[in-house]
Amino acid sequence: MRTVKASTASLKKAAALIRAGGIVAFPTETVYGLGADGLNPQACARIFEIKGRPRFDPLILHECTAARAKKLFSKIPAGAEKLMKKFWPGPLTLVLPKSRSVPEIVTSGLPTVAVRVPANAHALALIKAAGRPIAAPSANRFGRLSPTTAAHVKKQLGDGPDLILDGGATHIGVESTIITFTRGKPVLLRPGGLPLEEIEKIAGPACKPEKTGKKRPLAPGCLKKHYSPEARLVIIEPGVAIKPAAKAAYLAFSRKPAGTWAGVQVLSRGGDLREAAANLFSALHKLENSRARVIYAERVPAKGLGRAIMDRLRRASAV
Ligand code: TXA
Ligand code: MG
């Protein structure tokens, strides 16, 4: 398996690989995806194998235009239509009733499908050249830290993908916000790169997912434990004094802690939540490499992109 810089020639090659049933890791504006032909069940099955992902956790389909994305749905509520118009291409995934063309393996047998149009020139060129939707979860091993660089993908998946397209660091840095609709109202399934406040301005107030009472949750992939570094992660209040230790690392929001640590990362010196989100996974990858046994992570304000950051930290800290 090779890592190649994204270019006209390498994108053409990557598209041919996708059409032939191959697996290509590629950049989006949120995190790197592990892509396969979304209409080829066998190719999609390889994604689950490479990630070690359970089959009950469905995939997101990526399209290059809203017009093409809409063909993957069988019913589109008015609110969803407005969101697509306003936020695609961008870090928003919509979960709506699927059309017949979507294979069962993509949706894990659910009647709905998750679709988005990524705002990344390489991703759009790849989808366009492949001529079909690309199914792509984040390109990490199941339950582990998400990748925001090609090197992160290589570190976790090694020779799994047939090709890794290197398009540099992703600029949003956390996964897309996932929205579904129930009785015409938006429901937040996963906070992410598009702040909920912006979605609510267009589609009205969002509700929390209803408890289905079934074994399968409404958002099957939103497991309590997820996005985990190898070290134990503990969430702390900012500025609370923690005794530095040789085997402990520190993830600060805006101010460097005192003392000597196995590793220290500051998410945003200016206290900017967008910048903090963009740096979150790469900071956690670095602290994981520091071989600390525990990572203390400061709580950030739970508004705007802070909601996605806190969601990832909470799941990373779950045991
Ligand atoms: O930003 C992103 O969304 C990235 C990039 C690569 O596009 N992708 C990503 O995919 O985060 P993944 O597979 O790591 O997360 C997708 C989530 C999973 O939790 C999955 O359970 C949920 O979307 N999902 C997919 N289809 C669904 C459906 N029909 N109903 C509810 N949840 C669904
Ligand atoms: Mg993921």
Image (tube, rainbow, N blue to C red):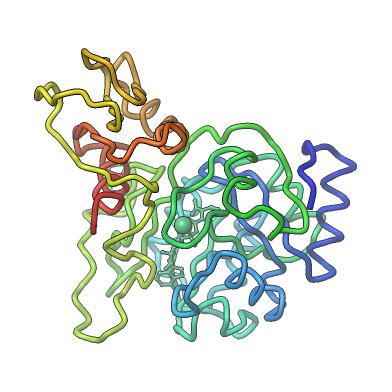
Number of numbered discs on residues: 0
In the rendered image, is residue 201 in sight?
no
In the rendered image, is residue 127 in sight?
yes
**Quadrant showing the C terminus:** bottom left
Whole-percent x, y for residue 234 in the image: 21, 42
Q: Establish if 68 lies above or below 145.
A: below
Q: Establish if 257 lies above or below 168.
A: above
Whole-percent x, y for residue 201 in the image: 29, 44
> What residue sits 44% from the left and 72% below the top?
96
> What residue sits 49% from the left and 81% below the top?
108
> What residue sits 44% from the left and 54% below the top?
144
Q: Residue furthest front?
A: 246
Whole-percent x, y for residue 172 in the image: 48, 36
Asked where in the image residue 61 lies, by quadrant, the reply is bottom right
Closer-to-camera residue (90/35): 35
Q: Establish if 291 lies above or below 17.
A: above
- Determine whether, in the image, residue 122 is placed left or right of residue 85: right
Q: Residue furthest left?
A: 240
Closer-to-camera residue (264/39): 264
Closer-to-camera residue (64/86): 64
Whole-percent x, y for residue 56 in the image: 44, 79
Asked where in the image residue 222 lies, by quadrant, the reply is bottom left
Closer-to-camera residue (134/180): 134
Q: Establish if 79 lies above or below 54.
A: above
- Determine whether, in the image, residue 67 is placed left or right of residue 80: right
